[in-house]
Image: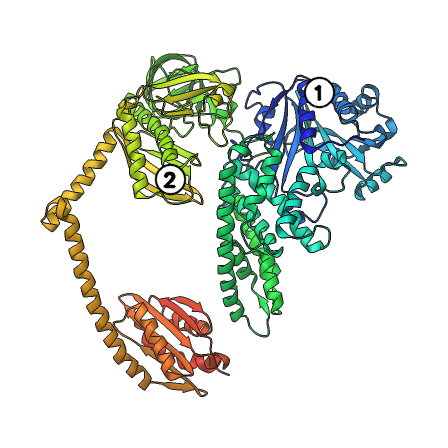
Amino acid sequence: MKYMGLNDIREAYLSFFESKGHLRLPSFSLVPNNDKSLLLINAGMAPLKPYFTGLQVPPRKRVTTCQKCVRTGDIENVGKTARHATFFEMLGNFSFGDYFKNEVIPWAWEFITEVLELPKDRLYVTIYLDDDEAFKIWTEKAGVDPKRIFRLGKEDNFWEHGAGPCGPCSEIHFDRKGGRAVETIEEFVKAQDEDRIIEFWNLVFTQFDKDEEGNYNKLSNPNIDTGMGLERMATIMQGTQSIFEVDTMKNILNEVARVSNVKYGEDDKKDLSIRIITDHVRSVTFMISDGILPSNEGRGYVLRRLLRRASRHGKTLGIDKAFLCNICEVVIEDSKGAYPELAEKKDYIKKVIKLEEERFSQTIDSGIQILKEYIDEIGKEDKVLDGAKAFKLYDTYGFPIELTEEILEEKGIKVDRDGFDKEMQLQRKRAREAREESNYMGKDIKTIDKIASDIETVFTGYDSLESISKVQVLIKNEEMVSVLNEGETGVVVVSKTPFYAEMGGQIGDTGLIIGKHGEAKVVDCKKNISGKTVQFVEMLNGYIEKGEEVQLKVNVERRKNITKNHTATHMLQEALKMVLGNHVHQSGSYVDDEKLRFDFTHFTGVTSEELVKVERIVNERIMKIYDVKTDVMSLNEAKETGATALFDDKYGDKVRVVSVGDFSKEFCGGTHVKNSGEIGLFKIVSESGVAAGIRRIEAVTGIAAVEYIEEKENLIRSIENEFKCSDKDIINKIEQQASEIKAKEKEIAALKSKLAGSAEDEILKALDDVKDVKYAAYYVRDIDANSLRELCDKVRNKIGEGVVLLGTSSEDKVQLVAMASKGAVSRGVHCGKLIKEIANICGGNGGGRPDMAQAGGKSPEKLEFALGEVKKILEKLVK
């Protein structure tokens, strides 16, 4: 049996199906498009669902892909088994109503026996129980020995997912050991359970449509959907027992072992950590490449979890610095041939990983401090950490449960895992409920997405803002109708339209649709899932009928302002690259008639000086009155011109490239000004962070920019009037006032210090004791929180061994602080428990360590009574 590398297998598969008339499509992004049922792409056919359901027309009826996938459902098994992985590649060939079993079965056999040269005497086939058609094709057309074909039931060889398209499937299996052939189903199943025989390719024959009553209705145009795990196929072709021994994964594994200075194969626990890192670094590299960034929710949380889990296992191997940011280079080097975007984004990927590693390192330190406080609160008899607290460490601070258990184990404390698991389940439930449910194969589709595929909507709005067109579809209340009447809202679809549908960050157009018998106001314009333009309308008067000719008019002034902001967005991106560096890449945008918003990759705040430079560059280019030109060209031609593309956008064979002189060049389907001079003026109004590694700039152009400057000038005039000075003297006046305020604050601080000093003597005079433990509980008036803490510390030091609890109030707030000496703590005093009870009386809450705690409350009128309760509480604590 010949050896083949993972990259060679991928290319061999795709080339083979190209030779059978298939269109090779690049892998779709890991971020699902128009599919709210998925957090991440987790199967080869997932991005192709709109083609199978008929919502979109495929680029060709025969398609082949190698799809990037991420699954984290079995994350706990990664590294423990030979085949579990969070990231994997899925090879597939698909037919959308073209060929069926007669073609795909012989092709599959040809590929595995002639291209891969797998020995026939080590191959087995399974089919659905009563799929005689498949059996006949396997035996007669492919020439498979009938003894090597086994019929299995629905659980194994029938694909369905609720109501909708479904059908039998046929799986191809490989015998790792060879030798005597298995002869019965029982032997076959046993060999599977023992991992001697493994399935590597599933051919799904989608030939039925299952209705709500459970009836299987034959499809007039059945489909083919196949899936072959690339890593698993590589284990067969390379004769390995585990995916971690496959060439590309072994390269990563060896690098992890080298960096950690650990020899793989000598320690099971360390080997597990090495395998987990090997898998997770692949996932995070590809996820970041597709524009995902670490966060505390959604797919960003998945990324953060994988990164931190890998980083944690690095620490168990003795790696005490950021290292994943370097390991990812091995992933990029091995995969850049099939995924060139990895090489293009290499520096960016490394930067994101490094920042998250450093952030996690800080988190670990914070988590350990919080865990110490939790340990102090644990009763000596219980010796169990509350599950909710363990989950808070995990969820809020990113502190792995394994690390919590490891630290506690050293102190003879256990974690309430049942409580932790309960909190985890509740969180997963919340996450599921936050995602919109959607049937896997397209049930519950909106009416606008059911518009017939033969209806076309041509956009004419690049050149004209008016057109005459025919009404093709009317929708009201999710139903197709023949007329829309006055006062009703609905959707109008016409054959050609000047209205721009919201896309690429640019908001949809508004305007009017005028018919013979009525007029509708267009309030929004969008595209449906298959790319047809739909106008959302409110009927102003009369009625509009299906089939009638109507006049469409775009709101001209609004469109002009939108185009100014859109072109300025392109110019802003280029200016940011010039000032901040080439790592800047669009991460989202929003353009309407009032402002523009641009999100971009950058890892620190943009300084005022940098913003001034960016603004000046854009305005200088505006004043040069560059022509704004749009060229339609092939995707490859566009890339050769150096045009900027978005991280995860999919582009067709032909793309629009928008150039602002020789300054900016981007892929863009939006509308723009004819020359940069039309923008007039560009003004940045804000800069902020929206996520780790993502910054946001908001800006205005044209008359909105002028109005913004006028507003600032009016503000300056108001300040001049207030200070009775000219604009040149404003800074001096502010500095003078600040200096006076500072002097007054010093006077106030000195007075407070004097008051605190006298209070110190009063507190010491009021000392009492509980079971020979000295304590002071005192209401200190006219003092701030900092002074209260300082005073408490001084009194504690003066009394030697004992506990001090001080309180103060201002308006509707209570502030409390408690401190205890080591001796008092050894006698059972716990400031956290003491202050919590006092705070509860004052309508608040709080806590802390045994030796120091702080709290707040909302009922000043109860403070004196609460302080009087200190003695009772101490009597319960002191032993």
Q: On screen, 262 above or below 123? A: below
Q: Secondary structure at mark 1?
A: loop
Residue ID for mark 1 = 100
For the residue marked with disc 2, what is the amino acid? Arg
Tell me: 246 left or right of 734.
Answer: right
State the CA–CA distance, disc 2 to disc 1. Answer: 50 Å
* Camera-nearest label, 2 or 1: 2
**Which quarter of the figure has residue 7?**
top right
Name the mark on residue 696.
Answer: 2
Residue 796 x %, y %: 38, 79
Q: Mark 1 packing: few (<14 Cα in 10 Å), some, or many (20+)?
A: many
Q: Quadrant of the N terminus?
A: top right
**Which quarter of the figure has residue 606?**
top left
Identity of the residue drawn at 50% across and 37% down: 291
Tell me: 426 left or right of 223.
Answer: left
Query: Between 696 and 465, which is closer to the camera in this rendering?
Result: 696
Name the mark on residue 674.
Answer: none
Is residue 219 something one can see in this rendering?
no
Query: Between 369 and 324, which is closer to the camera in this rendering?
Result: 324
Query: Between 639 and 567, which is closer to the camera in this rendering?
Result: 639
Q: How is the image coloured?
A: rainbow
Residue occupying the far left of the picture: 724
For the residue marked with disc 1, what is the amino acid? Phe
Q: Secondary structure at mark 2?
A: strand
Query: Between 262 and 685, which is closer to the camera in this rendering?
Result: 262
Disc 2 to disc 1: CB gap under 8 Å = no
Q: Earlier in the sequence, mark 2 or mark 1?
A: 1
Residue 143 x %, y %: 84, 22
